Image (spheres, grey):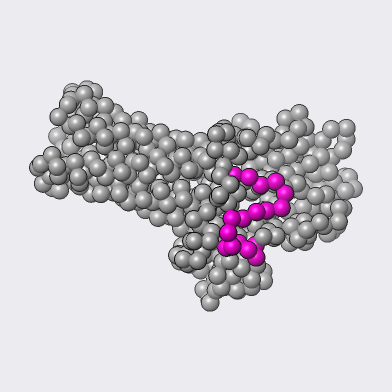
Amino acid sequence: MSDPSSSRHFTGVHHYEGESYGPFSFLNPTVRKQRLPPAHAAPASSQEHELENGNGAVNGVKKVPEKKDEIRAQDVYRKWRSRDNRKGRHAISVTPETDQNAKFLTPPSTSTLKETLRGIWRMFSTCPYWDVSYLVAVVFTLGSVIWCINAFFVWLPLQDPSTEFSGEIEAGGWTAFVGATIFEFGSVLLMIEAINENRADCFGWELEHVLEEKGLLRLKPSSNCKHHHKNKGNLVGKGKATEGKPSLDGPMESQDRPNSKDARRWTWFPTWHELTTHYFKELGFLACSSQMFGATVFWISGFTAIPGISERLTTTAAQNGAFWAPQVIGGTGFIVSGILFMLETQQKWYLPAYKVLGWHIGAWNLVGGIGFTLCGALGFAAANSGAVYQGSLATFWGSWCFLIGSTIQWFEALDKHPVDIEEGGGRVSDTQPVA
């Protein structure tokens, strides 16, 4: 879709046609709802024009039979979210037909048990290594697994001394370093994902006529997605030339002209103008920045946990300054990022969005950040055996919370076309956007 405000993408807080909202009015909207017009309706905007002509749209030639598991819908709403936009996802909400007034055929809800199991299978059967959002999720999952192993090394001997073995302390130090390093790498990928958000307002679906009934249109995932996630040349800064655009290894204009023939689709560093006029007003970018800050500071404690370095921290001041303080500061960064990721999915700052996967990812990361921060804070009282035990336990449950959040993010990264079916023919609640 062509965004009517694309020409002013870097000129202050964005305002869109239709229904858009976010938790804070001084930041860019994070959710936008747009009704999909029937194909026979005259285009009311450039957005609708592209629905009919830009993404495999309706031309009366392509006709296929109706499928059994499809939903007959009277209305379809596009749910654009800034988080989904970063991750190449295209959510829609569907109002089932009442009184034989269907205009569309849509895929079934992706929230059913069958579709959820299919998504879990997709996690183990596909490996889109070129998709930076997939890499972010997998890297964070790997880092969380390492931290869970580390948590066993530091907590289990306190819970059950008989399980302690020779070299366990050294293993705890090395796994702490490896886990922190992996999280730092994941945070770098997260920032790369944030600055490569799509700006051409990709719809991600295409329409085709249904053979049995005149005027009934089918929605299916588009093969002409404008997001970079299908571009196998991303990680080297290049990619395939798409229709109307040159190869990405040539000279490229700024991303503030997303529809320009020379507009780039991949970048490693934003300009200062882009930061001050756009990214600093993006809640998702601020959340990613907080995650990056937290992971970078937390890495210091991972480095000083390496055997041979930790033994040199012989004074309480050295231990507090080089090991425990970075845990507290870094963990605080994780807490802030978790809160911001939750807020990004909400209509109002005080209304949770329980039906959004991104909200749950932020919530689990928030609890994980609390665990890591608590571990560092209790470390200042290392002379107290009770504080040592609770600090090690906080690392344990905090690591598992990060693992749960990362696993959900892995599932989310592969679910590029979520569909929500509205109950009772009513509209999806604004307070609980679809997943």
Q: Is 165 situated above or below 286? A: above
Whole-percent x and y of residue 279?
51, 57
Give the residue displayed 87% in from the left and 38% down from the top. Answer: 101
Please say whether residue 234 is visible from this viewpoint: no
Give the residue displayed 28% in from the left and 42% down from the top. Answer: 327
Task: Decide which of 28, 242 is in the foreground and name it.
Answer: 28
Give the residue displayed 78% in from the left and 58% down from the top. Answer: 45
Left or right relative to 184: residue 112: right
Q: Is 23 situated above or below 268? A: above
Left or right relative to 408: residue 299: left
Whole-percent x and y of residue 370?
36, 34
Magenta part, dominant SS? loop
Left or right relative to 183: residue 341: right
Q: Residues in magenta?
A: 6-22
Q: Residue at the front extreme?
A: 26
Task: Decide which of 288, 204 is in the foreground and name it.
Answer: 288
Task: Decide which of 374, 148 is in the foreground and name it.
Answer: 374
Q: Is residue 101 magenta?
A: no
Q: Residue at the right extreme?
A: 214
Q: Is residue 9 magenta?
A: yes
Give the residue displayed 53% in from the left and 76% down from the top. Answer: 250
Please say whether residue 277 is visible from this viewpoint: yes
- Is the N terminus in the top left, top right, bottom left or bottom right quadrant? bottom right
Q: Is 323 situated above or below 1? A: above
Q: Quadrant of residue 405?
A: top left
Q: Residue at the bottom extreme?
A: 251
Whole-percent x and y of residue 131?
51, 55
Whole-percent x and y of residue 67?
77, 41
- Is the C terminus in the top left, top right, bottom left or bottom right quadrant? top right
